[in-house]
Image: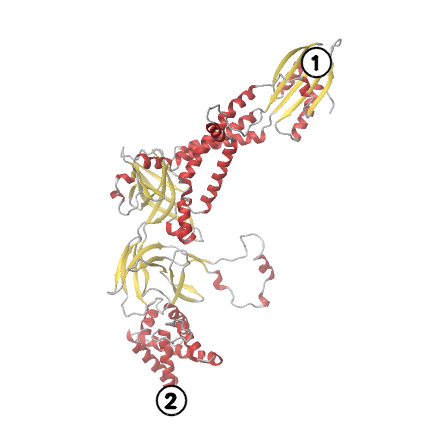
Amino acid sequence: MTVSTQGIEVRSSSRAVSQWVELLSSMRFAIALLTVICIASVIGTVVKQHEPANNYVNQFGPFWAEVFASASLFSVYSAWWFLLILAFLVLSTSLCIARNAPKIFTDFKAYKENIREQSLKAFPNRAENALDESAEAAANRMGQALLGSGWKVKLQSRNTSGGTGWMLAAKKGVANKLGYLAAHSAIVLVCIGGLLDGDLMVRAQMWFNDKTPFMGSGLIADVPEQHRLSSSNPTFRGNLMVTEGAVAGTAILAQPQGVMLQDLPFSVELKKFVVEYYDTGMPKLFASDIVIQDLETGESKPARVEVNHPAYHRGIAIYQSSFDDGGSKVVLQAMPLGSAVKPFEVSGSIGGSTNLSNGAEQLALEFTGLRVINVENFAAESAMTGVDVRKVDLRQAIESRLGAGNKTVTNKALRNVGPSVSYKLRDAAGQAIEYNNYMLPVDLDGQRMFLLGMRETPSEPMRYLRVPVDENDGMDGFVRLRTALADPELRAQAVRRYVAAAVDADRPDLAQALTASGNRALGLFAGAEASPSATGTPAVLGGLPAVSSFLDENVPEAERERASDVLVRILNGALFELMQLSREREGLKPLPRDESTEAFMTQAVLSLSDSFFYPAPMVFLLKDFEHIQASVFQVARAPGQNIVYLGCFFLIVGVFAMLYVRERRVWVWLTPVAGHSGSQATMAMSSNRKTMESDQEFELLKTQLLKVNA
């Protein structure tokens, strides 16, 4: 039997109906649907699904993000057109099975013993021979031999002019045809399981029960009934977030426009969340010790949920999906940059916010994240800045660029640098900038520094301001220097001290010139004055770029290098005196002129220059925290899961049957020889696939049945 790609031909008065039925039941239509589903699955794999809308706008731009959203490419597997294609695939494949199943079962039972003698001579595998035994005896012998080899045999007697002839028909491997039915049934079962476990039931309740997605905010308990699904909902898949020590019993089902709330027949209490880390800082194990409280019986059942080890209750699976912050309490210390405001503390919880105001300006401080472990790679820190050809290892240099992708010659120096806090400062217009600050200073290039990160959009990487620590391993020294730099009187006093120490008292003319240069350099660096630009571009306010811009505009190119060296020396000297003055105001001892002070001042000058590009008037450092974790579970009632498993089993059976089971049929026509006790045998063999094994098997059967030497 040959499986046809044509559909069912329906005898109908309407030609359009006949054509539609033929198309739906044809194999070409099912293959086209499978192709579309494969393309959609590729899109759903490449494009992250159910992400916030802002992420797609940042990735694709406003225009294409709107186009892709209108086509539901950000939620492919729950899109109406995807579910419609699945439904049509089920219908088309079912019609294909209904069309071919009767033919397959009929062919499965048939031996085709009515084939004519002349037809046997047209087969590629055929043979003839004269036998010394009668036709009936030869037929019985051959039948017994084939039965012993696992063939199914049928004998048919026919009257001929020379007497009674016998047709032997045998078949083997007819289960190959069942592979077609099993494979196509698998497609139907998998699609039905996908429809049952998808959003189809949720969509049906939204269509027929007037359920609508919730797009607001607030407490879950206050959400109206039209946004909730009953606990008897036959199928759903949602997320349940539970904080340590808290209880939750309502899952959230993400929808293209808002969310639906799914009430569960039980509640989950998170007793303890356990997480273990690799040396790289990646989570190695996270598990949740929970107590499931049945709302109907009041029964409490403890359970432990790990990745790939879910818990089950009332037909609902509870999977460990991920973990998050459960509202950790943090205490931040505000360190002003360039203002006379005293440092102060602010407390809050991750996920919350608080308002800040200096009277004229309003800011909202949003606590967005707390990470207690930050593992960074410091291997590059020890790398040489210069190259000595006598120290070059040629083998290592080649192996580092060739070979396996893991690059075993690359060394890593992983180190946990401690906790960090993330927050956002949002202005009155709603614009927010994200910040990420480490709690503890980090050793970089042989010096301890605080790392203060910021970025304006989530798609950008963090850019860090490096602030050197003072003698107390804190940031107070830098803050004092930055505050003093904004004070005109302290700047002038620092310049006078520097000039008095650098110029003899009998050189008033030189002291006057040096004072003017010092005031100009420190004023430019502090952003107190701006040099007008001859090209009309905006002047740079503050930091080393302001000094460089002044030199470019006012000093000839031939003298620029020498002038910049002089101006930088004056600036460094004045800043050192400014640092000493800031310490005197606080009643602290002056810094000694040693290597540690020199290293601090070198980095402080660079940090002060960069601080003018820091978009916030203050820095919030993590002073103390209470870490509270939350576990994110995926709860699912999936009645189609077992159907999908059955479909997968059928698919395996069907593929193996079609690929590895060969259907073979053998016919032997035995004609009695007139006036002789012997008979004439004509043999032929057919196979659904022409292979070397089929030829070898025919040669073996020819030898056994017809007694023909190979």
Asked where in the image residue 73 lies, by quadrant, the reply is top left
Residue 450 in the image: x percent, y percent? 38, 64
Q: On the picture, is 586 further left or further right than 277? A: left
| Residue occupying image coordinates x 42% and y 58% | 461
Q: Is residue 266 visible?
A: no
Mark 2 secondary-structure assignment: helix
Which residue corresponds to mark 2? Answer: 509
- Above-or-below relation of 271 to 621: above
Which residue corresponds to mark 1? Answer: 671
The kind of residue on which mark 2 rests is Asp
- Above-or-below relation of 451 to 170: below
User: Dot 2 surroundings within 10 Å: few (below 14), some, or many (20 or more)?
Assistant: few
Instruction: Name the image quarter holding the C terminus.
Output: top right
Residue at the right extreme of this rendering:
675
Q: CA distance from mark 2 to mark 1?
A: 137 Å
The kind of residue on which mark 1 rests is Thr
**For marks 2 and 1 on the same chain, the one whose residue lies earlier in the sequence:** 2
Decide which of 210, 466 is in the foreground and name it. Answer: 210
Instruction: Name the image quarter holding the N terminus.
Output: top right
Asked where in the image residue 44 lies, by quadrant, the reply is top left
Residue 491 in the image: x percent, y percent? 33, 77
Q: Is residue 254 visible?
A: yes
Q: Which mark is residue 247?
A: none
Mark 1 secondary-structure assignment: strand
